[in-house]
């Protein structure tokens, strides 16, 4: 946010019913994991930008997403996910070994 690092993404949450990114699991500076909705971010080559720290939500507030989503970590199996700017999953790319 404004060049200040609030945390780092540790996983991507993906809707189980349709291939779409719904948000990020962000490990914040206070060591708490918070949910960051995908629609609230601007993706850059080297950063995920947001306008307000209030967009980082306690997972207890958004338990719906944990129940309705899976994570990239659960799905990846040695692949990287290609996600469009709108959150749609475009495909998988095998990681080089």
Image (cartoon, grey):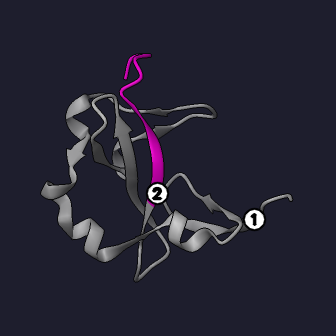
Q: Is residue 6 left or right of residue 10?
A: left
Q: Is residue 9 left or right of residue 54?
A: right
| Secondary structure type for disc 2 | strand
First reached walking from the N terminus: tag 1 or tag 2: 2
Q: Residue placed farthest to the bottom in the image?
A: 17
Q: Position of residue 88 (x, y in %)?
A: 52, 65
Q: Position of residue 8 (x, y in %)?
A: 45, 36
Report if residue 5 lies within the magenta region: yes
- Identify the residue at image location x=46%, y=43%: 9
- Label 1, label 2: how far apart the Cα atoms are: 16 Å
Give the magenta-colored segment's residue range. 1-12
Q: Residue placed farthest to the right in the image?
A: 97
Residue at image mark 2? 12
- Identify the residue at image location x=47%, y=48%: 10
Please count the marks in the image.
2
Residue at image mark 1? 93
Q: Residue placed farthest to the top in the image?
A: 3
- Identify the residue at image location x=57%, y=67%: 89
- Identify the residue at image location x=48%, y=59%: 87
Quarter of the view holding residue 51 = top left
Q: Position of residue 79 (x, y in %)?
A: 70, 66
């Amino acid at each position: 946010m404004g060049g200040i690092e609030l945390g780092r993404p540790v996983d991507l949450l993906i809707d189980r019913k349709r291939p779409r990114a719904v948000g990020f699991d962000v490990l914040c500076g206070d060591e708490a994991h918070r949910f960051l909705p995908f629609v609230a971010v601007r993706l850059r080559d080297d950063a995920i930008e947001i306008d307000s720290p209030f967009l980082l939500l306690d997972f207890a507030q958004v338990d719906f997403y944990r129940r309705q989503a899976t994570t990239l970590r659960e799905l990846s199996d040695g692949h990287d996910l290609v996600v469009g700017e709108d959150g749609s999953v475009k495909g998988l790319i095998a990681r080089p070994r």
